[in-house]
Amino acid sequence: MSKGARAQTAREKIREQQAADRARDRRKRVVTYATVGVVAVAAVGAGAWYAASKSQSEQAGANLAPVTVAADGAVTMAQAGVTAPVVDVYEDFQCPACKQMEEVSGSTYRNLAAEGKAKVVYHPITIFTTEPTKSNSVRAGAAARCVSDGKQWAAFHDLLFKNQPSETVEGFKIDQLVAWAKEAGATSPDVETCITGQKHAQAQLDYSTKVNTEQKLQGTPTVKLNGKEMDNQVVFSPQDLREAITGAAK
């Protein structure tokens, strides 16, 4: 083989080796990117799982703590002798965010009260000032005041949120409220008469004004733990909510 031929062969081998090296580098990069991608997906998946676990609603316990309906409209749920920590729940039956909170965290309040780990006080108020939401809220709030039995009140409370009307239509009509009260177990003729006549409508408005003024509420739902307003991110995260309330008892 001539000298020129040998040189050409050497150059070809060098080019082949360089091509092989480039191919090997590309394969390494692909494997590296794929590995990083898998790790990233796994991290995102773990983060999503963790977030979902914190926001998952608790299963409501079979037992309900004693419920006491006060004359002013506040309703206390607590085991005998439990005075702290105090969880004040300010809500409006017409408020969509309040409905969402009840769906997500309502069972946490009830479970903690049933476990004797908190004294939960509900404050059903009217925050709306325009129609039809104001009248809807007043009718519902006034009707709830007609149900004095604690267990029946709790059931009626849930039915009101379950059947919450749109903010754009007239809802919580009298015949509906009467029917839901009966479904909750409040079958006394006095309850029906009270709801039909909207006996407590003005009391609902007066209490709402008093609470809004004294508590300086910016809206509903508002939840206070021992008098201090809780962050909504905690309120809408059952796990964080439970930890915050049980931590306040230590």
Image: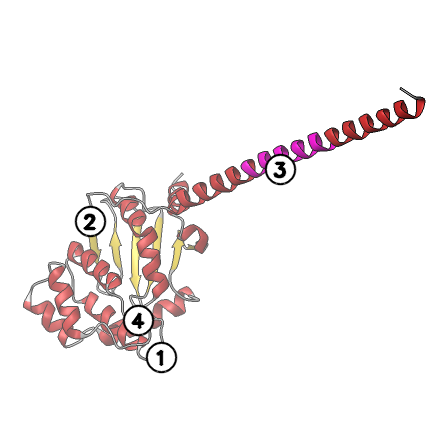
Q: Does the magenta stretch include residue 73?
A: no
Q: Determine the CA span between mark 2 and mark 3.
A: 59 Å
Q: Determine the CA span between mark 4 and mark 1.
A: 14 Å
Question: Which callout, 2 or 3, points to the residue nearer the camera?
Answer: 3
Q: Where is residue 13 in the image (x, y as percent from the top left)?
A: 80, 25
- Closest to the observer: 205 or 55? 55
- The magenta span reads 22-38
Query: What number is the disc on residue 130?
Result: 1
Q: Earlier in the sequence, mark 4 or mark 3?
A: 3
Which amino acid type is marked by label 2? Pro
Q: Where is residue 47 in the image (x, y as percent from the top left)?
A: 49, 42
Which amino acid type is marked by label 1? Thr
Can residue 93 be seen in the rendering of this structure?
Answer: yes
Q: Residue visible at 66% across and 31% down?
A: 28
* Disc 4 secondary structure class: loop
- Circles 3 and 1, Cβ within 8 Å, touching? The answer is no
Classify 10 Å Cα crowding around label 4: few (below 14), some (14-19), many (20 and above). some
